[in-house]
Image: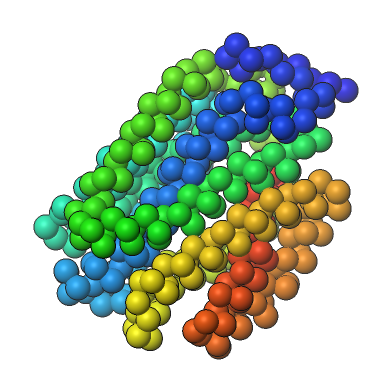
Amino acid sequence: MCWEGTIGSVRFSRGRRPVKVFLRDGKLVTLMLGHLTVDSYVGVIPVLYPLLIGRFEVNFATVGLVSLAYSGAAAVFQPLFGILADRYGTRLTGLALVWTAVTFALVGFVPSFPLLVALAFFSGLGSGLFHPFGALDVRALLPKRSLSTGMSIYVTAGTVGVALGPLIGIALFGLFGLHGTGLLVIPGIATGAYLLWRMRAAGPAGAGAKRAVAGARRAAPVIALAAVIGVMASRSWTVAVFQAFTPTWYKQLGYGPEFYGPLATTLVLASAAGTVGVGALADRFGRKTLIIGTLVLSIPAILLFTIFPGPWAFGSAILIGLLAASTAPLMLLMAQ
């Protein structure tokens, strides 16, 4: 059975058009560009840590509050933002990106560490607003038979953004110090404005979608949903720790940014490759099988990364990215 609908002026039919058609359409590419941009900011945070420790004279544990504020705000408020998207539509997805860019750009100019943490929190709110809006837009665009692959491609764009973040940060901070964050406002505002224009017709969900949401709420499998959330949280926590603290850890080991910057990027790029591969396999073999398999195999990869630091870590970082960090889009679809 095919399902037809309209987003803006673009008419589409689920089950008839492959993912590559939607890539040529332009809206999916626009959402991918927005996802890449908004997630590049979280990739910059780890390479900020060594500079923040020196400027504010804080310890390793305290500087982690920056990531906690950013990621915590993004995670805690996403359910509320999802409700807003269901009710009012997602036409303001680009505004969330602009908010993230402006608040993050100010991080390098604040005079105190508490104010910096507050800015990280407000910047995280923008990221938290963008993600449910973007995911709903992508789900509406894609045909059901290619949903896992299409969502994986979309999530991969964000992962590539996280991977580019350390390299962008190293370049900017090497030239301008902490004030280099000011230049990060440019891609956010440019991409956000483009998103506002492209998604201006993305209103609230149609009647059919609302009925489906209402039915899902009436029959919500609480235990199953809790299990999915638990797995998502453990996966995200593990990967976030490695992404956030690898640069600072390797600086303490005596390595320079020319080593730990590419190492952090390798981890995230491997995540991007794993995301696309797992999505394609999930369409064929099932999401549950892939999720369980990758999570089990990620355990030895994590042990190798922590026990054998140094050049060998590039290999184990690739394994962690391919396995532990690759299941995010599958978990997202299971939760939806």
Whether residue 263 is situated above or below residue 178 in the rendered picture: below
Residue 1 seen = yes
Residue 178 in view, yes or no? no
Is the image coloured rainbow, by chain, by secondary structure, or in one colour?
rainbow
Left or right? Give the position of 187 relative to 318: left
What residue is drawn where x is 73% and y is 72%?
296
Q: Is residue 134 left or right of residue 181?
A: right
Residue at far top of view = 9
Which quarter shows the C terminus?
A: top right
| Residue drawn at point x = 23 percent, y = 67 percent | 52
Q: Is residue 293 left or right of residue 198?
A: right
Residue depicted at 38% across the width and 26% down the height = 193
Total numbered badges shown on the rendered structure: 0
Across and down, in percent, residue 83 comes to: 51, 33
Looking at the image, residue 133 lies above or below residue 177: above
- Nearest the eye: 118 or 248: 248
**Residue 91 position within the rendered picture, expressed as x and y whole percent measured from the top left:** 47, 23
User: Farthest residue toward the left?
Assistant: 111
Residue 95, relative to residue 205: is it above or below?
below
Q: Nearer the viewer, residue 59 or 186?
A: 186
Report x, y in % for residue 145: 81, 35
Name the residue located 34 percent from the left edge and 68 percent from the top edge. Answer: 64
Quadrant of residue 194 within the rendered picture: top left
Viewer-nearest residue: 327 or 191: 191
Residue 232, image x, y percentages: 61, 58
Image quarter of the N terminus: top right
